[in-house]
Amino acid sequence: MRCHVKVLAAVCLIGGVARGQDNAALLDRLRAMEDRIKALEAEVAGLKGQPAPEAAAVTPVAPAATPQVANAASTAAPNLGGAQGAAAKVFNPDMAVIGDFVGVGGKNKSQPSPALEMHESEVALQAILDPYARADFFISFGEHGVDLEEGYLTFPSLPGHLSLRAGKMRAAFGKVNTLHNHVLPWVDRPLVMQNFTGGEEGINDAGFSLSRILPAPGGLFLEATGQVFRGDSDNVFHSWHPNNLSTVGHLRGYRDINESTNVDLGFSYARGASTQTAGLFNQLYDIDATIRWKPLRRSIYHSFTGRAELVWDHNQAAVTSGTPFGYFASGDYQFARRWFAGARFDWSERALSTLRHDDGGSAVLTYWPSEFSQVRGQYRHTRYAEGLTANEILFQFLFSIGAHGAHPF
Amino acid sequence: MFIRKIVIIAGLVAGICSAASKLNVVTSTEDLSAIGREIGGDHISIDSIAKGYQDPHFVEPKPSFLLKLQKADLLAVVGLQLEIGWLPPLITQSGNSKIQVGAKGYFDVSNACEILEIPTATVTRADGDVHPLGNPHFWLDPENGRRIARAFKDKLSEMQPADAAFFDHNLKDFEQRLTDAEKRWDTQMAPYKGRKVVTYHRSLPNFAKRFGLDVVDYVEPKPGIPPTPTHTLELINKMKQQNIKLILVEPYFDMRTPNSVAQAVGGTAIVLLPSVGGEKQVQTYFQLFDYDVNLLATAFGKYK
């Protein structure tokens, strides 16, 4: 019996000692963790540029001495825990809003414009969709409605160096048709675009676009684009039947003359059902030419861009014989880091008649307070086919907030 | 005679095969191509898009660049949004799956480097054209040059494993020459440690940190914003008060304001190169620092 009591007492003693040792080890670990938390608090406070908590003085950390090297950080200490909630926002698309405020003064009895107008607020949402595609949306808010200007999916790298785009988009017809309002060098669009290619809306429809860079000799860049659309573009094509698809083809040739100067030439063709009568078709032909000069060493101060675009509109619903034709030619010179001056000449027959034509000219002055805003003034003189003459002063404020978009070319 | 012909033909075929099997590397700037060339040697073909004498923030996305990108196996970029205004549409339009963002052939070297001026507070455009991910001119510290070279070695070895030993040998050689050159540059710059300077743009924080220069202000009132009369007057006063004589200007900025400020303070405005290719004689990463360090040492030597 005495022996059993001794054994029991010994077991209890050993157990107590062991528990005491566990508690001590646990306390040590707690102290170590506490120190670690204090050190991390000090580090976070240091990175935020705020004074560290009082306790941080116990285990000082020198954040400034910590190199901000991505791969070094991973070897310095294990990353504990996942990213914070804010990290999930990295998958949000790049967002930008571009405001276009326009004012018009003067008389225009043929095509009057509002004196002041928040002409457009364009919301751009752009992101890489997955390893195979990217998505781009441009939603245009006017003062009285909303319109999807463009919304498409792009597969940039299909086999055979093909690039496929599906959705609603501005057609690759000429140069100006592809440009959004905020990248135009003028407040308005040339007369030839207003008479033949749907004005501001342009040839803009839902469909597919397939393009490929073609092999070419001697540093020549050649790109071919083929597009198929539903067949509805305001004032250009109308899909009377589901099979009234419209098609657009574009061939672009580009070449650097030297490091400062380059030439861009394009040939376009578009065909779709006429808006006038079912069963009739409208075919458009376009030649666009651009010459650019920008000396690389002073590229932020001086540049010149000359543009011209010629359009022929062969509409089976035309009321006169012949093919209506129109063109514009313009030049824009950057004479200082923030200043651009330009001029444009317009001449265009009406869409369905070679007997009537409009012509005009504009002088433009643009000031860029920063990369994200522009102030533009434009004097516009127009003589309409009806015999009316308009002299107007247009001004425009363009401003962009949000993600930094690519510079137009 | 017959054997000689066969040997010649075999040599030609071997040459063609060798050229065809070379990794085709395109870089966004000449600095990256200069370092990549040190590592890849003649086992790669390497070319850059932006010239060393142009502003890398404002490169035109010319279609001719697409011809380079279309054939690229690897695209090395500076990153940190330096190229945000021109490179993304080029990558998309290139039709080249190898170099799309996230692909094996898309190589952002900023991930390997020490980055300065990472904003710790809220950033807005009221601060000018700021880079929210940190200052992208990081290659102007030789230590980052070393890091870029190591990253190139890893990336090239990953993409062309057969030449891994060659790339490794070139890296060791590059590092040795860089260590030797650093001693030379440090010796030249040692007397001028702590000297105060003004720069046009925020292009030199890594260079200044490495060589102990104190950049006290900028000709631009804010990044990307051209000089204003008010800021220029403030700058002149500050330079006079602190006896600052040197203004460092990138080759793509207008010299009128820096020259007039320098004249007002009795100092000098010099064109310091931020990139390889900034001048014809500066074609390697070593020549870039040789040029800049010599220029600075000479300029500092004029003012006690």
Image (cartoon, rainbow, N blue to C red):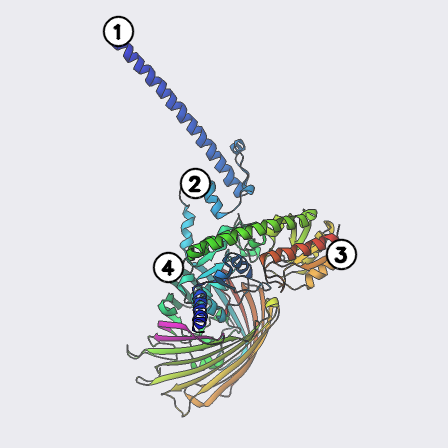
Q: Do the residues at pointers 1 and 2 share their chain?
A: yes
Can you identify the residue that label 4 sits on? Answer: A131
Can you identify the residue that label 1 sits on? Answer: A2
Q: Residue at x 53, y 63 (%)?
A: A372
Helix, strand or loop under label 4: loop
Helix, strand or loop under label 3: loop
Can you identify the residue that label 3 sits on? Answer: B266
Q: CA distance from mark 2 to mark 3?
A: 54 Å
Q: What type is the residue that disc 2 sits on?
A: Pro
Pointer 3 indicates a residue of which chain? B
Can you identify the residue that label 2 sits on? Answer: A78
Helix, strand or loop under label 1: helix
In this view, which residue lies farthest toward the bottom?
A: A321
Tell me which label, 2 or 4, sits earlier in the chain.
2
Give the magenta part as a residue range.
A205-228
Tell me which label, 4 or 1, sits earlier in the chain.
1
